[in-house]
Image (spheres, rainbow, N blue to C red):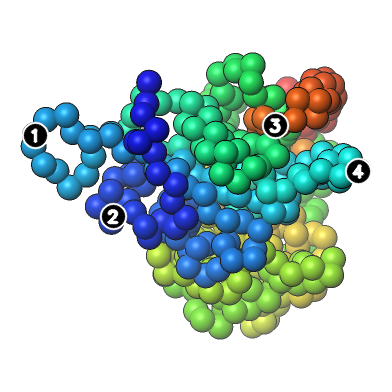
Amino acid sequence: MTNNNNWQLIHSLTEIKPELLELIFSCSDNPFTSLDFLLALEQTQCIGGDSGWIPHYYLYTEEQTSTEQTQVPAKFGLFISYLKTHSYGEYVFDWAWAEAYQRNGLNYYPKLLAGIPFSPIPCNKWLTNSSISELEAFQKVKNNAVNKFNVSGSHYIFPANRLAHNEQWIEREGHQFHWFNQNEDGTLLTSFEQYLSLMMARKRKNINKERKKIHDSGITTEWRNGKNVSTDELETFYHCYQSTYYKRRQTGYLNLKFFQQICATMADKVQILFCFRENNIIAAALYIRSDDTLYGRYWGCVEDNEALHFEACYYQGIQFCIQHKIKCFNPGTQGEHKISRGFKPITTYSYHQIELEPFHDAIEHFCKQEKHHNKAYMTACDARLPFKS
């Protein structure tokens, strides 16, 4: 059992002593739960203020039992969560639940969310060297949020893995499409052509046709990492990024300062693909990489060209993974068009606890029904994969 005195609510990562902060984030191997990424969100005001994402980090510390004095506690942990006043930027959609609350004259917000802002990335939100499990830690966070902030419910989205069964939490299933750098014998691929050779002829022909269309139109591509992207190029990327939202009469969640900061602080993790016509950038796609996964995140263009989207966001990412021996490519959420290009459906999970029992029971029933539909959908997606076998 843990003592409540071991837990402390933190509203900014800068409230934690640097030596402890360094140890906490040494427990993360994912760039989206790195100190550099989360600090950039805070320090560029993409979260906090009136953004609807209020940092609600929960710090666990357990002091040494001996008389020896040290700079840091023997056991520690940090749970990454936020109080939310809307449901934007989450990618696990609960708008219908919020509308049900509204129809009944109830407040759905604030709610507690364990997730990475604007990043539907499966990863662990509990960074610790203790034996406390993710759900045990989140239960602590949840109890605090219910008592102090009267949240309607608590939501853990995109954990790294499926969590152990707990009757208090509703398990919800979703899906994404990921590409895996794997030959028939399980070894890593050595070329894009080798990857195409695994496909049925018709599918292989279609991909080659799309790529040839880009080549014949005079479009070229170049990769930059955070170290070698110029100020002008980054500003052009940002214009492309915002153009994707402008088409929907919206504004992107992230500001230019955020991209400038991550290019400076996590330069080796940031990869930007630029697409040129002559010497002019006409499209750009930003990726973030770890040792074993490439994450496709933000894309935009100043010319409408469907084939260019496939080239910049899928084929170039696959080539990058093959060249750099990266095992998995996660291009983001949604998009059935990824299936015919070799992206396989994988199950994602989220966990929910609603404070009002009638709503909790109704949502649990909905999620059970949704699971059946999701499984059937993924089976159908599997049948549409382009591979020979």
Query: Residue 70, how many percent across, how many down?
Result: 14, 43
- Return the residue at label 2: 17
* Between 363 and 333, the one nearer to me in the picture: 363
* Cα separation between marks 1 and 2: 21 Å
Which three-letter amino acid code belongs to the residue tagged 1? Thr
Disc 1 versus disc 2: nearer the observer: 1
* Cα separation between marks 3 and 1: 43 Å
Judged left or right of residue 256, residue 73 is: left
- Return the residue at label 4: 103
Task: Identify the secondary structure beneath mark 4.
Answer: helix
- Return the residue at label 1: 67
* Cα separation between marks 2 and 4: 45 Å
Query: Residue 239, how many percent across, how many down?
Result: 68, 76
Disc 2 versus disc 3: nearer the observer: 3
* Cα separation between marks 2 and 3: 34 Å
**For residue 113, which quarter of the picture?**
top right
Query: Residue 262, how many percent across, how many down?
Result: 47, 65
